[in-house]
Image: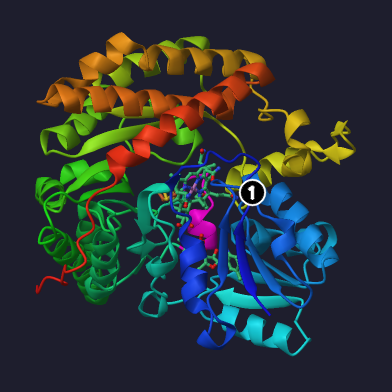
Amino acid sequence: MKIHLVNPSHVSFGTAVITPRWLYVLAAATPASFGDPILVDETLSPADPDRIRGGDIVGIGIHTANALRGYEIGKMSRQRGAYVVFGGIHATLYPEEAHSLGGAHAVVKGDGDIVWATALEDCRKGAPQSIYLGGRVEASNFVAARWDLVPLNRYMWASVQTVRGCPKHCSFCSVWRTDGQRPRQRSSDAVIEEIVQLRRLGFRFVALADDNFYPVTLTDLQLAFRQGDTHRLEELKAMREERFELMARLALLPPDMVFFTQITMEAAEDPSFLDAMRKANIKGALVGVESVTPEGLKDVYKDFNLAGEGLVERLRTFRRHGVHVLGSFIFGLPSDRPETFEATAAVAQRAEIAFAQFVMLTPFPGTVDFARWEKMMQGDLTRIAGIPLTRRWLIPQALRPKLYWPHPVMSGEEIRRRTQAVWDRFYTLEFIWKRSRFIKSLRGRLTFVFISKLYRQMYADTGIATDSARIAWSARWARWLAKPCRYLFSACPMPQLQVPKP
Ligand code: B12
Ligand code: SF4
């Protein structure tokens, strides 16, 4: 009996950007009596049905975008006589779908760290339960990933989680609802040990797969103080201290390490935090800018962000402290107007951010936006391949429309076209070259250009374009560009590296 863990994808690039962390966490959560699981990441290469035999157990992790491919693998595995267990955010939200469409014997809702072993034992006994409740595991019980199973030289970045959950409540995001608003922060020991293991293997680029690396703001501290809530204040201070402790320990790792995380722009209020990030080699961060207007921020319940000049200043502050920003912007918000695209492109340029992504508002299951939209769509009789738009992820990829959020003044196609134009403008060779000014060496600048182009190809065209020829061309390009890129990201293994003492 073999255990297979499959990360589904309908496109394979041969080289992938970031390791799907859940694969390596679940591998570690697999009891030794089952042997080493076989890990299949379809962003590298498609699953091979011939490897799956009767009596094997196939674990499939799905988010909304890859659910349909996951169901194909589930059905195929069940037909071959294997036990099929689904997990991940989409299976947590729609367990019945995995049963009816994905051939699931069992679905794990929530975190798999602890309950996975029970599900495996039950399958071994031939009696899987239909649902397992994994809940929200405390940070001290997060299982450290098994990096000894990672294929070398196939990924550009490894991924290590330091904190799960986020205290905010953005309307388009499912994190605070599924992972909770109480940040679950791992100890610095657990994080550093994983990173040292990765550096020994030759990974020097590590994405900190966090929801929000700055979970405690100065405003949170002031509020607890003003309310005289001593317990809360102490709790927040301890959490903040732990962040600094982690960063101080990251700073002791080999200096060629590069970390990247996700953070709210509030961190710019705190120069000591940004300085600690720089010293820790956290060289970049995805910052959810979302909108450049106050109305847009209100639309997404994100009024803790700044708009206008204040926003430009906040983003520049990151840069001044040596943390480069990947700004994430959303188009198609109810208050957006045709001129918002131009204004956003201008802010992105002026704010001196290194990279930007421009996504179109898409209601993702598990979010407030989705719940509202689903209600609004109740009377909508549109069907594509017999599937209502509110179950869009079940529509075959080739027929799946791109944007469904009705907008008061623009059509979906207009939003898509304008979004594409902003990508095109931000990633012109001229602008990329200008943005690369902060890099000293010519080689470094050329690498920046190369990565910018790769990012644009992998993200914009495959994700936004509707024209299938352009998508196919883009996927080919990305595949071609990705190969040399993986060498740029690899480093000499350091098998002797020890965990630095704090
Ligand atoms: C890091 C990250 C990324 C990274 C890296 C992705 C990668 N290759 O790993 C990047 C930046 C590339 C990314 C991109 C996107 N992401 Co993302 N990402 C995350 C983030 C912050 C952490 C994921 C992670 O590694 N977690 C650590 C692992 C250990 O946790 P886990 O995956 O949840 O797995 C646990 C359980 O779910 C369960 N489990 C998972 N699989 C399985 C399988 C089995 C069999 C079992 C038993 C259990 C199980 O057990 C695991 C251990 O407890 C999550 C938020 C979050 N808190 O999870 C969003 C998240 C997954 N992303 C999300 C989204 C929307 C996206 C994008 C679509 C964004 C965009 N607009 O383009 C793209 C899609 C990319 C793609 N096609 O895959 C959403 C998904 C929502 C949904 N309904 O699907 C999330 C939840 C964030 C959000 N804002 O709501 N993402
Ligand atoms: S700050 Fe980021 S992680 Fe937190 S709820 Fe908003 S979008 Fe989600």
**Residue plotted at (77% across, 76% down):** 130
Q: Is residue 307 left or right of residue 92?
A: left
**Residue plotted at (67% across, 28% down):** 402
**Residue 358 seen in the figure:** no
Q: Does the magenta stretch include residue 173?
A: yes
Above or below — where is 314 with respect to 338? Answer: below
Q: Is residue 497 left or right of residue 34?
A: left
**Residue 61: % across, % down:** 61, 60
Above or below — where is 209 with respect to 438? Answer: below
Question: Circle 1 is placed at which residue position?
Answer: 46
Q: In this view, does 342 lie to the left or right of 377?
A: left
**Residue plotted at (20% across, 23% down):** 445
**Residue 168 seen in the figure:** yes
Above or below — where is 486 with respect to 76? Answer: above
Quadrant in which residue 364 is drawn: top right
What's the amino acid at mark 1? Pro
- Count the labels in the image: 1
Dominant SS of magenta comes to: loop
**Residue 81: % across, % down:** 82, 71
User: Callout 1: few (<14), some (14-19), or many (20+) C-alpha neighbours within 10 Å?
Assistant: some
